[in-house]
Image (cartoon, coloured by chain):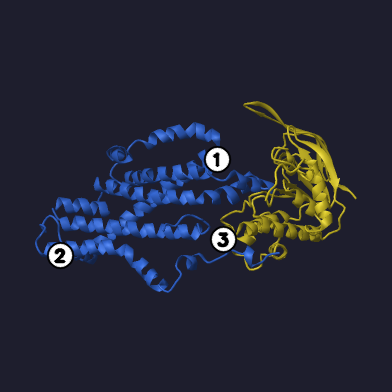
Chain colours: A yellow, B blue
Amino acid sequence: MGVAVSMENVSRTFRGSGGQVQALADISLEVELGSFVALVGQSGCGKSTLLRAITGLDTGYTGRLTVGGEPVTGVDPRRGIAFQEPRLFPWLSVEQNIGFGLRLPTTERNRRIAELIEMVELTGFERARPSQLSGGMAQRVAIARALAPRPRVLLLDEPFGALDAFTRARLQDALQDIWLREAVTTILVTHDIEEAVTLAQRVVVMTPRPGRIQQVMDIDLAYPRNRADPQVTEYRRVLLKAFHLDRSAAVPTREIP
Amino acid sequence: MLTAADSRVEPAASAQHSGPSKGRRAWFGRLLPFTLPVLLVVTWQVAAQLHLIDTVLIPSPQQVFRTLVEAAGDGSLWENTQASLLRWGSGFALGGGLGVMFGSLVGLFRLAEQFLDSTFQMLRTVPHLGLMPLLILWLGLGESPKLVMVGLASFFPLYLNTMAGIRNVDRKLVEVGRVHGLGTVELLRRVVLPAALPSILVGARYGLGSAWVGLIVAELMGATSGLGFMLSEGQALSRVDIVVGGLVIFALAGKLVDVLVRAAERRFLHSRDTYQGV
């Protein structure tokens, strides 16, 4: 398999009024073509900074960062991104939002939009305005918009972070189906360990101050995955341990009647 | 995956007025704005007929109506209205167009802001209605001082609202545009301008209103046609009914344009998700 995204000693330092803050320190990572990688960590661990660098929205990094063998020097429509907020254009309908970045002749364009609307299961809402959509539906539109120009890499920055637990679970399943169908290299930034374990082939654990990769864990489970699967739960437990959030050894301090 | 629980789309209208009294409420809502003006006119007419008011100083609505019909009959009413609307439209197009142009320039480029904005803000505080005598001295009694006055009156509302609209565009939406590979021009056309449009339309509504006021002032001083001329002629002839009739036409035309601009807003701003009042 080829390499889709390659990082070698990528660092990023922000200079603010309070001095320098190192957001990323010596990040080295390879993301294989067509794979699904999750970057997990608490707030401030630099995972979103790294994603913005891969997107090309932040070019102030040092080190070597290449996508498809080419160094990242700016944004590129071959990299699609969806953010935590849907960021839909309020004056465009659902189908116009999805087609925003499409540069195709009308027939092909309409075919691609119809295909995406079906994929994110928004049939019947083609002409709806963003203000009429629920949070989950708006996020589906955002993901479809990112996928529309058939990017080489799909970047997701905590896309389900603002959704309720039920909607989030449904959208995670939807994303899994989309990835299986489109076979697009996907990098997902999340602070939700269960989300990372359920979706990704490889989970990259990051720690803050400065942002570093603490460990990389391969999740050797077949797709489609089920979050209730005991093996998924087992991986989740191991990861919780990595974050020192496993309390199985905690001792009771009082009897609770 | 997508189930009924995930669908929240509901037609806004039916959500707002549901229940059995829907038809009656719509009917009531449509009539409500007219109640106050009708009530005022009726009271006025009754007061005039009972001689509670001096009809020489305050003619009855009936008298005013008769005067307007007369003026319509000899063609002078249409002539004056036409002259005023023409000045209003062309002055607004001129001043408003420049306002949008400079507002965009200052909103988009910080260098332009540093260079122009403080001067414009200073000029804005000059009461432009007071410039009319100066404009007549400089430009004479023809059409040009009137155009400049109406243009001045419409410039600032559009300048300010265009600039504010552009500066208030969500940076995150601009980022989405950049990620999709849009260049500067495309970004302005497809993201910044549509996002600033609501604010620009608000400016247009204010601008049309203030242009209307500028127009009267311009026509009161040295005009030979227009509704403002009709007012000053009525004053010269001590015909209060002509003055009041002219004011009625002013009010009606102003309202008509406001209705048109609101319709344009609804057409372009169907996407707004704002509080509509209880």
Nearer to us in this view, B23 or B167 = B23
Q: Are marks 2 and 3 on the same chain?
A: no
Q: Is residue B261 left or right of residue B2?
A: left
What is the CA distance from the residue labelled 3 to the residue labelled 1? 31 Å
Work out whether residue A221 can be spotted. Answer: yes
Q: Chain of mark 2?
A: B
Mark 1 neighbour class, 10 Å CA radius: few under 14, some 14 to 19, many 20 or more = some
Q: Quadrant of the C terminus of chain B?
A: bottom left
Q: Residue at x 74, y 35 (%)?
A: A208
Residue A62 % position (x, y) = 77, 32
Q: Is residue B165 left or right of residue B155?
A: right
Residue A82 % position (x, y) = 69, 50
Q: Which of the numbered marks, if any, corresponds to residue B108?
A: 1
| Residue designated by label 3 | A132
Mark 3 neighbour class, 10 Å CA radius: few under 14, some 14 to 19, many 20 or more = many
Q: Residue furthest right?
A: A1
Q: Amino acid at mark 1?
A: Leu
Residue B207 % position (x, y) = 39, 48
Q: Residue at x 17, y 65 (%)?
A: B62
What is the CA distance from the residue labelled 2 to the residue labelled 1? 58 Å
Q: Amino acid at mark 3?
A: Gln
SS assignment at label 2: helix
SS assignment at label 1: helix
Q: Is residue B214 above or below residue B32?
A: above
Q: Is residue A66 left or right of residue A74?
A: right
Q: Chain of mark 3?
A: A
The mark closer to the camera, 3 or 1, is 3
Q: Is residue B146 left or right of residue A222?
A: left
Residue B77 % position (x, y) = 25, 61
The mark closer to the camera, 2 or 3, is 3
Q: Are marks 3 and 1 on the same chain?
A: no
> Closer to the N terminus: mark 2 or mark 1?
2
